Image (spheres, rainbow, N blue to C red):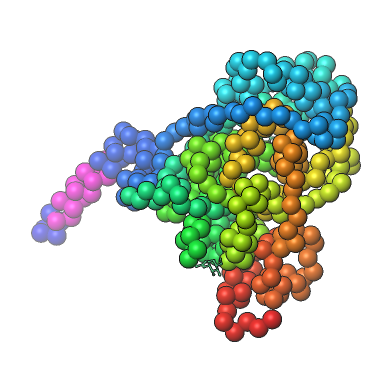
Amino acid sequence: MRTFRVMIIFTVVLIFFYTTLHLEVTSSPKSAPEMLTELLDLPPQVQFQDRITVPQPKVLNVNVSDSFKQTITQNKAYWNRLLYSALKNQGKERSPPRSGSDWSSCKVTDQELLRTNVHDFNSYNPLLQDFVQSMNCRTPPVLINQPKKCFSAGEDKEDEKILLLGIKSTPAHFERRQAVRETWGQERVNKTGLRVRTVFLMGRPQVDDPDLSLLLSFEAGLFGDILQWDFHESFLNLTLKMSAFLQWTLTYCPHVTFVFSGDDDVFVNTPLLLTYLQSLGSSEASKLYSGHVIRQASPIRDPRSKYYIPMSYYDGPYPQYVGGGGFLVSGALLESFYSVSQIIPFYPIDDAYTGMCFNALGVIPQSHEGFYTFEIKEESRQSLCVHKGLILTHQHSPQQLKRLWRGIHSPFLTC
Ligand SMILES: *[C@@H]1O[C@H](CO)[C@@H](O)[C@H](O)[C@H]1NC(C)=O
Ligand SMILES: *[C@@H]1O[C@H](CO)[C@@H](O)[C@H](O)[C@H]1NC(C)=O
């Protein structure tokens, strides 16, 4: 009898408990960031505001070099025509900025217009069609921000020298990011005073990908190094990613000394990179655009390649550019880089686009043999002595990053 009574009380309590639980669940559907902030007591530097629009940085008056106009001529191709029409309008009053500042309506939806402008538009593959339609979409709202990334709490460090690592990643690459954090991307202050700051750059997953937003918010809260924008991850959106990162840096990290931009599967010998940066004279340090220079390249005209560019879209060679796997830019160049990118139409290949912008500014890419993004032999890929002497190699697994990092720091390594 007694046990029966206890059981009844227990059941009532349980029912009550579940009802309140249920009520709680149905009454306030919380957003993932809200849930996380509550659950985890997140550090204050993380901002989970929805869709912040980064203010447009100041646009300087820049001259487009003659050598750029000689390399990329005026002809019938769509991109070339867009470029020359932008150059013609350059001196005229700039109202409003050409770049789609209204993110929701920047896409060209008038197919008729596109077919008039690009006679074989229908034969472009769907991704490229998509790119051509969204070439004016340039200011994606920020979904996960790190506004304090370049400021140290409570310290006035205006004169501090910062090396900002902007690493191109995608939401699903958790493991790669963790390997980078544990190895070359560690945030630290070098004895000589250069402070390393790291951010991972990403858009949103594709429509058919699983929803990773909760995990990403968690990761951002834990490490404070995720920057995410409201655009779909896609190979052809890398120029947009680069441009968004540039806008972000000019806004939130305006005093940066050097920016390194690279992929999340490269290995960087950070100590060697820092030594190199410290060794630069002030004039060199202020006009750095360096890495593995690619000379005399032209668009790939094979429709089966993912880099395929049709003649009707772009007609001409590429100016010299630095391979996008990993390269360096001086902070002092960012404002003019951004300004000239307001004139030069977006191009689907991000490193070629960056090269165009610097060529237009008259900045000559500098080759550094430590940036090794050629095909590398399998035994060299694993070799510690090879990596001890190079600044950057590419296409590594997370495990390889860890092995190489441990290896080059070993006191027993003799080369
Ligand atoms: C780039 O992102 C935008 C915004 O999400 C999207 O509309 C567009 O389709 C993407 N472009 C490509 C080429 O995937
Ligand atoms: C700081 O930089 C110097 C070279 O400038 C390098 O030898 C040293 O290992 C670096 N220290 C740290 C802690 O990264």
At which x and y percent is residue 192? 50, 63
User: Looking at this view, is 66 or 372 the one in front?
Assistant: 66
Q: Quadrant of residue 99?
A: top right
At which x and y percent is residue 113? 77, 15
Does the segment drawn in magenta span residue 314? no
Q: Is residue 154 left or right of residue 377?
A: left
At which x and y percent is residue 216? 49, 48
At which x and y percent is residue 258? 58, 50
The C terminus: image quadrant: bottom right
Q: Main secondary structure of the magenta part?
A: helix
What residue appears at the point 67 percent right and 25 percent down from the top-left corner?
136
What residue appears at the point 75 percent right and 23 percent down from the top-left corner?
87
User: Looking at this view, is 22 or 390 the one in front?
Assistant: 390
The N terminus: image quadrant: bottom left
Residue 325 in sight here: no
Q: Is residue 152 above or below residue 375?
A: above
Q: Is residue 385 above or below residue 129?
A: below
Does the segment drawn in magenta span residue 14? yes
Residue 182 in sight here: yes
Q: Is residue 63 above or below residue 293?
A: above
Total marks placed = 0
Q: Is residue 66 left or right of residue 6?
A: right
What is the span of residues highlighted in magenta in the rendered image? 6-19
User: Looking at this view, is 142 or 198 the one in front?
Assistant: 198
What residue appears at the point 78 percent right and 15 percent down from the top-left corner?
112
Q: Is residue 115 above or below residue 299?
A: above
The outermost residue toward the left is 2
Q: Is residue 98 left or right of residue 215?
A: right
What residue appears at the point 50 percent right and 44 percent down from the top-left corner?
255
User: Looking at this view, is 268 or 304 the one in front?
Assistant: 268
